Amino acid sequence: MAVTLTEKAATHVLNYMSKRGRGIGLRLGVRTSGCSGMAYKLEFADELGSDDIQFESHGVRVLVDAKSLPYLDGTELDFAREGLNEGFKFNNPNVKDACGCGESFNV
């Protein structure tokens, strides 16, 4: 089981954490939401949670709670700029369907 970041995503996270001045890594998870059933959660982690599973990717510690891991296993997080927009993109092999707006998915 693994969750990884592309080099671009890792560089973005490390730069932001440096500006932020604190943090131990990036926390990924899922929550029930949206028209397809699940949505991604993404935040900077300042401490390790009791049920967190840790991965290391391009120098970034990635934390995933145990309940979210089955939905995120094999996911690669990328950072992309498209025109004036920029943001993280989840390349999740477990997704079977996603809503048209891209906010939610199901497995």
Image (cartoon, rainbow, N blue to C red):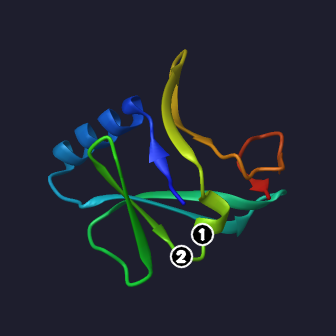
Which residue carries the number 1 mark? Answer: 68
Location of residue 65 with respect to 62 vertically, above or below: below
Which residue occupies the extreme bottom position in the image? 50
Marks 2 and 1: CB-CB under 8 Å? yes
Q: Of the numbered discs in the image, which one, if any, rests on residue 6?
A: none
Q: How far from the left and from the top, in percent, is residue 44?
A: 35, 58
Locate residue 34: give its quadrant: bottom right
Location of residue 65 with respect to 103 vertically, above or below: below
Q: Of the numbered discs in the image, which one, if any, rests on residue 66?
A: 2
Q: How far from the left and from the top, in percent, is residue 76?
A: 54, 43
Q: CA distance from mark 2 to mark 1?
A: 6 Å
Q: Secondary structure at mark 2?
A: loop
- Which residue does the image show at 83% across and 57% down from the upper left? 36
Q: Is residue 39 left or right of residue 36?
A: left
Which residue occupies the extreme top position in the image? 83
Q: Amino acid at mark 1?
A: Ser
Q: Secondary structure at mark 1?
A: loop
Q: How far from the left and from the top, in percent, is residue 4?
A: 46, 46
Q: How far from the left and from the top, in percent, is residue 97?
A: 85, 48
Q: Residues within 10 Å of mark 1 (few under 14, many from 20)?
A: some
Q: Is residue 15 left or right of residue 71?
A: left
Q: Amino acid at mark 2?
A: Ala
- Image quadrant for the C terminus? bottom right
- Image quadrant for the N terminus? bottom right
- Which residue does the image show at 42% across and 74% down from the upper left? 52
Q: Is residue 85 left or right of residue 63?
A: right
